Structure formats: C-alpha cells, structure tokens
Amino acid sequence: MRAWCAAGVAFCTALLMSRIAHTFELLAQSRRKALIPFITAGDPDAALTVPLMHALADAGADVIELGVPFSDPMADGPTIQRSSERALKQGTTLAHVLGWVAEFRKTNTRVPVVLMGYANPIEAMGAEAFAERAQSAGVDGVLVVDYPPEEAERWAELLAVRGIDAIFLIAPTSSQERIERVARHARGYVYYVSLRGVTGAANLDIAEIARKIPQLREHVKLPIAVGFGIRDAQSARAVANVADAVIIGSRLVQEIEACPRERVLGSISALIGEIRRALDA
Amino acid sequence: MQLYDLPDDKGHFGTYGGVYVAETLIAALDELKAAYLHYRNDPEFRAELDYELKHYVGRPSPIYHARRWTEHFGGAQVYLKREDLNHTGAHKINNTVGQALLAKRMGKPRVIAETGAGQHGVATATVAARYGMQCVVYMGSEDIRRQAQNVYRMKLLGATVVAVESGSRTLKDALNEAMRDWVAHVDDTFYILGTVAGPHPYPLMVRDFQSVIGIEALQQMPELAGRQPDALLACVGGGSNAMGLFYPYIDHPEVRLIGVEAAGFGIESGKHAATLCAGRPGVLHGNRTYLMQDDAGQIIETHSISAGLDYPGVGPEHAWLKDSGRAEYVAVTDDEALAAFHDLCRLEGIIPALESSHALAYAAKLAPRMRSDQILLVNLSGRGDKDMHTVAEKSGLTL
C-alpha cells in the first residue's frame, strides 16, 4: 500500500480516506469553502431527484445532503415539513432514496452524499440492514436528527465499520461537555446549527456564529459546517468567513416549491451557482 | 423481590424511553431534568403541590362502589376512581399543576402545551391563569374543528390557541409544533407535556405527578373494600392516567394491571389506536416505544371515537410493562366504548369521558368471568361533558 502511495498520492488518499474527508482536504488545499445544498428526496417528485443531484453537483456543490422524508419532522420548519409531505405523498421511502443514491453514483463518484433524516424509517428497515444498503448505494455520511450521541454509540459503530461517516449536530445551546462528546463520536464534518429554532428560521446572527466557531474548534478537529437560516449569497459568504462549509436547505426547498416543474433544474442551478461564486470570490 | 426502580438515569425503561431528540433540544431537557430531580424531593415543593392538589384540584378523588353496574353485569365488584370529579373534569390537571409549579420555580413566565381533544390544553390554560403565566396551546386544525367548545374554554382562560396545519393536523402534529416552539424559546418557556411520552424526563415526571391517583387508591381500597383490588383497569392513549394508577401498584404483583386501548372500528379494520396491541417499536417524539407505523417507518393516522386516545405512540413505560409481562394490554372498539358510556350514565348517574368508557367496556367483559368476591378498580379518568356532541352525533342527533 505504501509503495502505491508514493506512486499516486491522490489515488491512495481516496482509498484511505472517506469521500467526505477527501473532499474537505482538497478544498483546504485550494483554500476554498464547502457548499452543501440540502434537498428532500422525492420532492417535487421521484423522477426529478437524481437530475437535481446532478444539477447541484454541476453547479458547484461539494457535498449533497439528501433529506429522507419523515411524517413527523420535529426539528424542521414549515418549508421542509411541506417538502417532506410532498415527497411522502409521492410514496417516497428510504429504500427509494437509497436507490436514487446508487443511480447518482453510476455517473458521479466524486461528490459525497449525506443522508439526513429521522430515526424511525431507519429503524423500520433495521439499522444494520440500512448500513449495508447505504454502503453499497454509495452513501458517504448519515445524519439522524433524533439520534444524539448518547443514544447512538452502536449506530456510529455500525456506520464506521462500513466506512460511512456518522454526522452529528452541535447547537448554540450545547454545553462544553456535549461539544466534547460530539467531537469524540462525529466523523466527516460537524453540523453547527446556527440559530435557536428550526430549519428555515429567519433570525441568523453572524456575529454570534463568529464568536462560537473558534470555541468549537478547540475541541472539534473536523470541518465545521453551518446550517439553518442561511438564505442567500451574502449570508453564505458571511458564514463562510468563519466556517468550513455552508449548508443551504430551506432556501433551496422553497425554490423547488415555488418553481414550475420544468424550470426547477435551471433555477436551482442558478441559485447554487450564484452562492458558489460568492463563496469563491 | 427487587423493587421497581425504572427509568434509569438516562430515562430508559429497558430498551424503551431515552432521549431521541435533536441536539437543539438537549440543553432544555438537561435544564428541566436538573430542576425536576432537585424539586422532586424538595419538602417545600411537595407541600405546595399537595396544597394545590387538595384545595384547587379537589383531591383526594373518591373511590366509588358501582353497585348497580356490578349487579347488572355480575361477577366481580366494580369500583371507580373518580378522577372525573377533579377541577376541569379529568386527571390531566394533576400533571399540569405539578409542571406549572416547576415552571414557576425555574423562572419561566411562558408555558406551552400540545392538545388533542383539548383536555390537556384546558388543564394547562387553567393552571396558567391560576399562576399568572402566559399560555400558548398548539392544537391540530382538524381537532380544533372537532372540539370547538374546548377551544373556547381555553380562550376564556386566557390562552392563545394556535392551529397546527402540518401533517395529519392532529395531536401528534401539535406535539411536533410545541417542540419546535420550545426549541426557539427555551429561555423563557416551559413545555407542559400532557402525557407519559416524549423525551426523558417527561415520562418520569408526568408519571410521578399522576401517581397521586394510585397512591390514594392504595390507601382508599383497604378502607372501603377491606383489601386491594384484583385488577386495575385504565384506558391508554399516551397512557398518563393508566401510569398514574398503575405505578404505585407495580410492586404489588398480586394486582393485575390492565391497560385498555382504542380498537376504533376494530383492529382488523386498520382504523384504530391500539398501539401496544397492534403496533411495533420505533422512535417518535423523543423516545423509543411502540408506534403505529407503516412498513417504511412512517407514522400512520390513528382512529378512535375518543380524541384523547387518538395517538400513534404510547408512553415508553407501558411498552416496558407490556414486554416484561407485568401489565396486560387489550383493546375495545368504538361501539363497545359507546355502549359502556350509555350503561354508566343509566346505571350509576355518571357521564364518563369516552376515553374512560374504554376501560369501563373492558370491565363489563372481564367482571362476569370473575367471582363476586373479587374486585376491579376502574380509573374513571374524566367526565363526559366534552363528548356530548360526539355521542349525540352517533345517536343521529344534532345538538
């Protein structure tokens, strides 16, 4: 293995590191910040999910967060609740979502895909069965909103042995002790919730984030992604000044909701492209 | 025998319970847990709670020997624990008084609650008025339509009722929305959860506040009947009245604990709320418990004639009591509950809540199979005034 490494560093890095770690390493080398869009799988419909993933990747997404719809999305605001309802109305299941990731992987092996959702659909499939199917589909990370680290030790282990990163949240209210705990369990990146509330809320406080992130970095060695409440190129740029990655969810989902179906891909590409340029400027 | 000491310090009842919430809620739950564990055994807190339960709620609630009912059905003697006689007409206020007193000590001037039928909302609005707190109640828009009278009661008591339009627009969605409010307003807000579900410490705390029911019964039954009952019966939606009656009896293995769920149109119809009888374990609303869910793990809509039992989850302690065999869970249909409702009205002059009528309906089935020197204690968890419209409609009348 070491001899190979000498022959081709990039190839070897890709083998030894998760796709997420590799992505962040490349970004760090080029001093760029990661752009992580979130969409709900199956919204507005099943046929558009994989094309949307490709559109996001082509427009400059570094990681794609794919929401697994759930009937009771307790930590989400109205925008993402409605997108889950639309997806569920189309009959979207976790098995479909895994199928879409596999399809995306047929032509894109570069951009990491992180599934984000709630525990019950995973438990209904069986945690172990899910981990196996996620691995073969080409899923790189999983964030289960209602698995805090203390309920997720076995879970993180199941993912780790299959090379999938267990991603955890840190909130503005998280104590020092909890930040340390999350830092011990997390892989890939840490998702810092930028405000007190649910996804899509409007009360983003950049100064507060700028104050908090250096404190997190004392314990968290992984890249720090910031999400909840980032709405445009300007707020994305401001957050990217202090964080490693910017997550855009509700704003995109809103666009998908508002747009006529035939214009969704173009409109999402334009929005992500604009934020990409702001981040790289 | 080792005394029952669940939950553990992380809120687990075996594999059930726990804290399955987003990180954004953890600090609030930690603060609540610390405060509750502190005041739980604080003599001043206990004294104020006892005073309020006695003078404001009207406790202890009596136990009543339903002689004509017993004669009518034959077999075991049926006694009723009269939670319907509490202020606001149900057991719900035992819990809201306790949590409101805790909120006061934690310096939270605003309380929020979820409600289905409106009973817990009314009980929360009531104590908020009593202690001078701002009160917001989340209620599914579908339930608001069905329970106009309780909505008006809450407004009279000074509460703001917020219509929840997401999901199935019922109790589970109201609970989601209350949690979302709490995440955004943790600093000044206390979430008064209405049942023994939700993340730790709620199942523990609500059980403790409701256990006054069983503690009184333990003392009243020997005084009244010369001994403890052979079985306790209580309806189970989320399960707070049942847990309140059962908990002090868990270490009395000679007393059977029987929870009665809502079979709606019948378990085989799929339109029911019999979570423990027909559901599967999963994670919802912050805890691991039995759930009504489809094969893909989505929560499905439940049905019961009684809005208070119309919930797709159940308290995690009930899940544990079921699996461990300490309690039994059965289900009765809408029609059986309705028949028991009418029987109690005519035989005893008591109009029971449709929820409580489920427990009565099972008593009517069980008692005739028992000897006349045996005793059943049924928790009459609430009165039926709120159900007039539902019952009249079923009889083809419009009020």
Image (spheres, coloured by chain):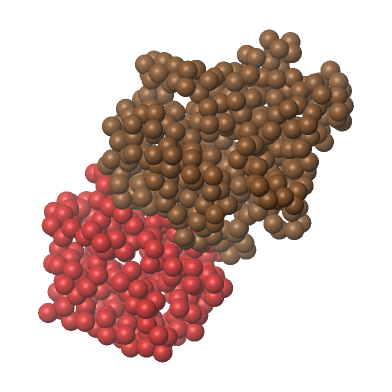
A281 shown above or below A184: below
Quarter of the image with the N terminus of chain B is top right
B2 on left or right of B268? left
B335 shown above or below A207: above
Residue B232, position as x, y percentages in the image: 70, 28
Residue A63, position as x, y percentages in the image: 32, 74
- Chain painted in red in the figure: A
Q: Quadrant of residue B47?
A: top left
| Residue B278 visible in the shown view | no
Q: Residue at x 32, y 85 (%)?
A: A267
Q: Colour of chain B?
A: brown
Q: Quadrant of residue A56?
A: bottom left
Q: Residue at x 44, y 28 (%)?
A: B98
B358 shown above or below A5: above
B367 on left or right of B221? right
Residue A200, position as x, y percentages in the image: 31, 64
| Residue A38 visible in the shown view | yes
B73 on left or right of B247? right
